[in-house]
Image: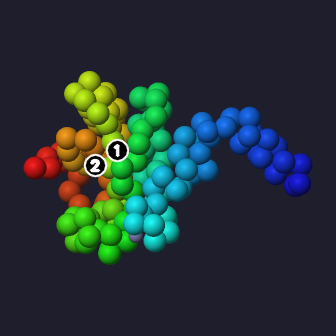
Amino acid sequence: MEMWLNTIEWLKYTKGANMGDLTANFNRAEYACKCGCGKDNIKDELATKVQLVRDILNRPIKINSGIRCSNHNTTINATPTSSHIDGWAADLGYTGSAARYELLNAAFQVFDRIGIAKTFIHVDVDATKTAGVVWLYS
Ligand SMILES: [Zn+2]
């Protein structure tokens, strides 16, 4: 048992920053509420699918927003029914139209609920909401 744990630690060190503690390339902290409250119980299904998008893109993705506590969700004037509150959603950052194209192309292979904003795309796996939709943020 001890030897197995040591092997995992060794892999973490040798793979360095490319190995996340949540999925292959993402750390749980990247999905934590941005207000600093410590809420970080993002849903595994969401994190797994974001990793799939990352695998298709084959380059880093910035998580602009993951899970949110209700206070932070209110502070940023997000909708009170936001899928971020229960950890079903993430906003994936990008810059420019080429990056938007690549990110959307990858996201459409994985997600069926996508919101498009100028600097991020929202993806979620909220089963209580309508699937097969794309919306815009004004
Ligand atoms: Zn918070």
Residue drawn at x 67%, y 37% as measured from the top left: 16
Furthest-left residue in this view: 138
Q: Nearer the viewer, residue 22 or 13?
A: 13
Estimate the x, y position of residue 64 in percent, counting from the top left: 36, 50
Circle 1 Cα neighbour tier, 10 Å, few/some/many (<14 / 14–19 / ≥20): many
Estimate the x, y position of residue 107 in percent, counting from the top left: 32, 37
Furthest-top residue in this view: 98
Circle 2 Cα neighbour tier, 10 Å, few/some/many (<14 / 14–19 / ≥20): many
Quadrant in the picture for residue 82? bottom left
Residue drawn at x 39%, y 56% as measured from the top left: 66
Residue drawn at x 26%, y 70% as measured from the top left: 75
Q: Which mark is residue 92?
A: 1
Left or right, residue 22 beside residue 115 = right
Quadrant in which the N terminus appears? bottom right
Q: Is there CB contact under 8 Å for labels 1 and 2?
A: yes
Furthest-bottom residue in this view: 71
Q: Nearer the viewer, residue 58 or 119?
A: 119
Colouring scheme applied when the structure was drawn: rainbow
Q: Amino acid at mark 1?
A: Leu
Q: Amino acid at mark 2?
A: His
Q: Secondary structure at mark 1?
A: strand
Circle 2 is placed at which residue position? 122
Q: Secondary structure at mark 2?
A: strand
Q: Nearer the viewer, residue 72 or 2?
A: 72
Residue drawn at x 14%, y 47% as measured from the top left: 136
Decide if residue 3 is in sight here: yes
Spatial separation of the CA atoms under disc 1 and disc 2: 6 Å
Left or right, residue 10 beside residue 130 = right
> Which of disc 2 and disc 1 is earlier in sequence?
1
